[in-house]
Image (cartoon, rainbow, N blue to C red):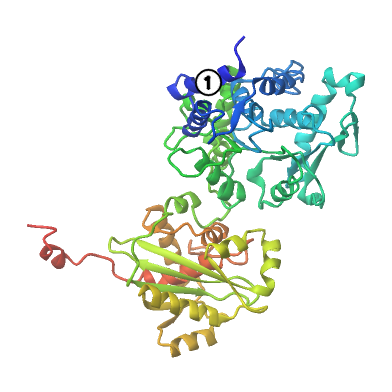
Amino acid sequence: MKTIKQFLIDYSRDVISGEIVACEKHIWACQRFLNDVKREGTREFPYVFDDEKARRFLYWMTQFKHTKGPLQGENIVPEPIQIFIFGNVYGWVHKDTGFRRFRKVYWQVGRKNAKTQSLACVASYEAMANGENMSEVYIGATKTEQAQICWKEIKAQVEGCELLNKPEQKYRIAYSTIEHPKTNSIIKALSKDAGKTGDGFNPQCGIIDEYHAHKTSEIYDVLASGMGARKQPLMIIITTAGFELNNPAYRVEYDYVSRVLDSNKVETNEQYFVMINELDKGDDIKDESNWIKANPIVASNEHGIEYLRGELEVALAVPEKMRNFLTKNMNIWVNMRENGYMDMQAWTDCGSDQLPNLKNRECYVGIDLSKTIDLTAASFIFPLDNGSFAVESHGFMPEDTFHERMNTDNVPYDLWEKKGWLTTTDGAVVDYDYIRAYIKRMEKENGWRIKEIGYDPYNATQFAQQMEADGYTMVEIRQGVATLSEPTKDFRAKVKAKKVIHPKNDLLTWAMGNAVTKVDAQENIMLDKSKSTQRIDPAAALINAYVRASQIDTSVDLNSYIQSGAFSL
């Protein structure tokens, strides 16, 4: 009989060779496994593959029955993708301690690819069969209904399992809790809207279902922070793609795990298992041969193919349904937020780890002075020689309200401060002298030649007068469509044309993703602060700067061009 390890080796080779159709990140995951096998048990890689532990979990899966679908009532037979994922998760252990290697798992895959079924098997295993006494397993979700989906699947699997209905393995179900008296273990659903924070919990296993729907990382953070006392805890995230690119699933996790898989990147995390099943860039969604990339289970049989054909047919007939087809079935992250201003994928594509040399360059500054107790921002735009624009931005927040804002906004302001994207000012209100000093310092240190500073006149009269006294040209930017519509549209068009370059400033990116627009009858647009559920100040400041920067003439002087020798008649 073939060992689990050999199965994974053969599977990986088939994926890499193309015999099994897979996306680029799936191929990377298989190459990662083969690389690990080569260095197994070495000083630099102190992990070995325990075939028995991998087989034990996969056997556990077979003790449960399908609870729905065409296979309802039949025992689960793990699909190749499940064997690969969970063979890795449970097979790799530390060579000295025997404790599991992977403490975190991320699996992104199209809907109806056994996500909930897999999570349910993991939950019951971690509570009842992994040898951990007093195990606590929590299913984390933003809404009670979502958390209950996985919990009910666990309940149905357990109730239909002959092994767990023997006297020595008996369980109890009461008050939305599954108890396993033999090990004093529990399985519970945890949701933010139920008012349960998870404080004081000691999870052996934290399960995050459909992470794309989480607007913050609050549930994830609570579960992760409670695992410190466990010897070999497990955090497992399984999700489809989504259409809120500013949520932590895309903004933080997807970006990070993609770098963990990519051998061309320097990012490494030996304790994080990653599998991403998605369409690759440029793949035709109508080409059925591509579907298996995002649907390794559904698209492996005719019943599943028929299901996907039906979903595509509806999406093509009703454009409003296309967003769900792309995200849920093809597993493509899509920025189709209602009234969202920026195409966040286009914005991401404009990011660079190294901006062009901006020393001694002309620039335009935009200021957005919000309420003095909140975030405020200064943004900079640099016209480049090729007609593109480089941008920088910096935020300011009063120190006394800093931690309160971290709790209410649920974003890592402290991390952004450490990265140099945010400054905390003394006291309970933003001290505008900090902003004046910051602009002057950046100008002096970099030799920037500030042409104009555009500002929203609200709350800024005294600031503008002080800056004018310092010798700066201050330009009032009226906050109406007559002033803002064309620059706001044009800046977005520049981003889509990749004529904007930014330094991957998370604070600015977060604000850009928060921005929504209001549109009048003539299709004029402007950013709508009242409808933006999170802060947009750095983005608003950037638009104020672009109002002035977009007025410059970036066309080439033909006579100078000919005389330079770059063109001849």
- Name which residue type carries label 1: Ile
Quarter occupied by the C terminus: bottom left
Q: Secondary structure at mark 1?
A: helix
Please say if 67 is above or below 222.
Answer: above
Provide the residue designation for mark 1: 9
Look at 88% across and 23% down and name the residue there: 169
Q: Name the residue at 83% across, 18% down.
A: 163
Q: Is residue 247 visible?
A: yes
Rendered-image quadrant of the N terminus: top right
Give the residue displayed 46% in from the left and 19% down from the top.
19
Q: Is residue 557 left or right of residue 189?
A: left
Image point 68% across, 30% down: which residue? Answer: 98
195 vs 205: above or below: below
Above-or-below relation of 255 to 171: below
Label 1 environment density (alpha carbons within 10 Å; few <14, some 14–19, many ≥20)? some
The image quarter containing residue 111 is top right
Q: Residue 527 location in percent, x, y? A: 53, 65
Q: Residue furthest bottom?
A: 469
Residue positioned most to the left: 569
Residue 532 visible in the shown view: no
